[in-house]
Image: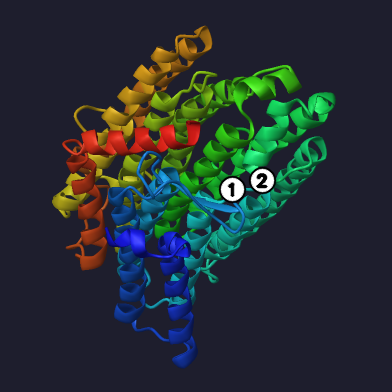
């Protein structure tokens, strides 16, 4: 195929397209400062995201980065600092999907906003950082990509400069992010001190050769601090406190962007670091304990704290923020279930969940953006009776809520089903407890997700509303997300195969 004739650096095309789109938006802003041409700005961002998505899908279909394809194996660039494999392309695809949905939805949301070009530019730069995180193969490139993603995200949360809540949320997000970056860098320095390497496969080689046996304590502390950095990026316990504040204060499309794309990017570096740099058997011999125990504890704690906190909220956006913490706990099962013999089934299930989550969670936050566009308040009661005025959007909301809860036959049910069966297949007592926690927390989540559906469809409105506007772009993004949440069901075979192959690539 034509892809075989491309130079190796072309494998970075999905990330380069996102970066090129950000530069194009900067040029547009330079030529026409304070431009409010929403069609041009939103259109450029959307086209760039869809082009990146198309190239990522094309590469996956062509077998780029898949072992076993003659001449198309895993592509290493810059002496192995970056690597393009099926997992990198899979997560780039998730980032591009969420970026496209958020770009379309922002067209209506940003009406009359002052900093529109800056807004779209920052989204594309953050997406570039997330796509780079998917390909990063050393602790240095991971940190650089992490910061490339984080810095625009801080600005995006605080971009509503006249809104005190937005500015305050941005400041809190920045301060906690700076603290987590310091912890992560310190963890990197300890791992380097123990192994003398920063490249992931080189770290694994040192551990397997037994050259780090004398530094077990140092390495164990370094790994623990790396887990802290990942926990911040994925909004996992105990570094989850920023998420409700940031998501509630940020513009709703940015909440969708951070809770879906940013979370996926955080998980891809966790998957890559712990499957590539720290092979379970060799690392256990050095530090004296399997690192999967940390993720077993984190998975149970994160899903439980997130779901119980979500069940007590009286504001919709804050409920979704805490529920996103619960979903981070579900995905952590993918790391908790890794064994010395593999674990591609449970890790592939976690990757499937992130793809489905990208549609259903983004759609849920975009519905909140639609409600804010209408001037609806933040509490559940404020959403009462919205279905009388906007049945299509509220029907889509029902799909998102029931899919997030894991009700069959929606996509969220299948991804949780594969997570559950994958955990059972591991067969250890700890994973049986994790599987039980998944079921209990999913049942609990049905309570608060149903509460929102009940509010919009059954409860009487607390105020009489005039006819609501029908913003085309926001509606289009919500409907596309809802359709994909449903359509993923018949497509789940190919989705499951792609995720499992991507997981097997990094575990082989």
* Residue 363 x, y percent position in the rendering: 30, 49
Mark 1 is surrounded, within 10 Å at the Cα level, by few (under 14), some (14 to 19) or many (20 or more) other residues, namely: many
* Residue 448 x, y percent position in the rendering: 36, 31
Q: Is residue 289 or residue 501 the one in the foreground?
A: 501
Q: Is residue 168 or residue 105 the one in the foreground?
A: 105
Label drawn at residue 106: none
Residue 272 placement: quadrant: top right
Residue 226 placement: quadrant: top right
Which type of secondary structure does the marked residue at label 2 adopt?
loop
Mark 2 is surrounded, within 10 Å at the Cα level, by few (under 14), some (14 to 19) or many (20 or more) other residues, namely: many
Work out whether 325 lies above or below 112: above
Q: Are marks 1 and 2 in contact (CB under 8 Å)?
A: yes
Residue drawn at the location 19% of the way across and 37% of the way down = 458
Residue on which the image places disc 1: 137
Which type of secondary structure does the marked residue at label 1 adopt?
loop
Query: Which residue is most to the front?
Result: 70
Question: Would residue 430 appear left or right of 52 to someone viewing this image?
Answer: right
Work out whether 118 lies above or below 352: below
Query: Which residue is most to the bottom?
Result: 31
Question: Would residue 296 appear left or right of 344 to someone viewing this image?
Answer: right
Q: Is residue 246 visible?
A: yes
Residue on which the image places disc 2: 199
Q: CA distance from mark 1 to mark 2?
A: 6 Å
Work out whether 416 lies above or below 116: above
* Residue 216 x, y percent position in the rendering: 80, 25
Residue drawn at the location 22% of the way across and 47% of the way down = 484
* Residue 376 x, y percent position in the rendering: 33, 56
Q: Is residue 198 or residue 90 the one in the foreground?
A: 198
Residue drawn at the location 49% of the way across and 48% of the way down = 265
């Amino acid at each position: 195929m034509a892809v075989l004739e491309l130079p190796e650096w072309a494998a970075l095309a999905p990330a380069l397209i996102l970066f090129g789109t950000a530069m194009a938006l900067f040029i547009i802003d330079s030529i026409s400062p304070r431009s409010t041409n929403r069609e041009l700005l939103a259109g450029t961002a959307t086209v760039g995201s869809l082009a990146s998505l198309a190239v990522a899908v094309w590469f996956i279909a062509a077998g780029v980065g898949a072992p076993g394809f003659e001449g198309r194996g895993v592509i290493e660039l810059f002496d192995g600092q970056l690597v393009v494999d099926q997992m990198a392309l899979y997560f780039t695809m998730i980032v591009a999907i969420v970026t496209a949905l958020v770009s379309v939805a922002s067209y209506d949301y940003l009406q009359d906003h002052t900093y529109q070009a800056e807004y779209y530019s920052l989204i594309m730069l953050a997406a570039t950082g997330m796509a780079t995180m998917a390909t990063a193969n050393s602790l240095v490139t991971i940190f650089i990509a992490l910061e490339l993603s984080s810095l625009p995200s801080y600005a995006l949360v605080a971009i509503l400069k006249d809104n005190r809540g937005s500015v305050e949320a941005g400041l809190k997000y920045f301060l906690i992010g700076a603290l987590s970056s310091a912890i992560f860098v310190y963890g990197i320095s300890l791992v380097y001190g123990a192994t003398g390497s920063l490249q992931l496969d080189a770290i694994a080689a040192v551990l397997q050769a037994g050259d780090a046996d004398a530094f077990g304590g140092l390495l164990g502390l370094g790994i623990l601090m790396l887990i802290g950095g990942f926990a911040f990026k994925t909004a996992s316990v105990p570094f989850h406190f920023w998420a409700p504040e940031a998501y509630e204060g940020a513009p709703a499309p940015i909440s969708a962007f951070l809770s879906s794309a940013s979370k996926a990017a955080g998980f891809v570096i966790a998957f890559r670091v712990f499957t590539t740099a720290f092979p379970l058997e060799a690392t256990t011999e050095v530090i004296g304990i399997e690192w999967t125990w940390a993720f077993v504890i984190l998975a149970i704690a994160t899903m439980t704290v997130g779901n119980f906190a979500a069940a007590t909220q009286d504001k919709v956006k804050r409920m979704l923020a805490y529920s996103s913490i619960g979903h981070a706990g579900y995905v952590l099962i993918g790391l908790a279930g890794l064994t010395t013999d593999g674990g591609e089934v449970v890790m592939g299930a976690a990757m499937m969940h992130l793809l489905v989550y990208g549609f259903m969670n983004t759609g849920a936050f975009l519905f909140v953006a639609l409600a804010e566009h209408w001037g609806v308040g933040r509490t559940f009661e404020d959403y009462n009776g919205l279905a009388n005025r906007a049945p299509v959007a509220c029907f889509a909301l029902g799909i998102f809520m029931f899919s997030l809860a894991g009700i069959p036959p929606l996509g969220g049910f299948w991804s949780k089903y594969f997570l559950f069966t994958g955990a059972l297949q591991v067969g250890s007592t700890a994973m049986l407890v994790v599987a039980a926690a998944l079921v209990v927390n999913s049942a609990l989540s049905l309570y608060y997700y149903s509460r929102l559906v009940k509010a919009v469809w059954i409860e009487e409105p607390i105020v009489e509303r005039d006819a609501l506007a029908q913003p085309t772009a926001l509606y289009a993004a919500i409907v596309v997300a809802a359709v994909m949440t449903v359509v993923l069901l018949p497509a789940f075979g190919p989705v499951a195969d792609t995720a499992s192959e991507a997981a097997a690539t990094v575990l082989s």
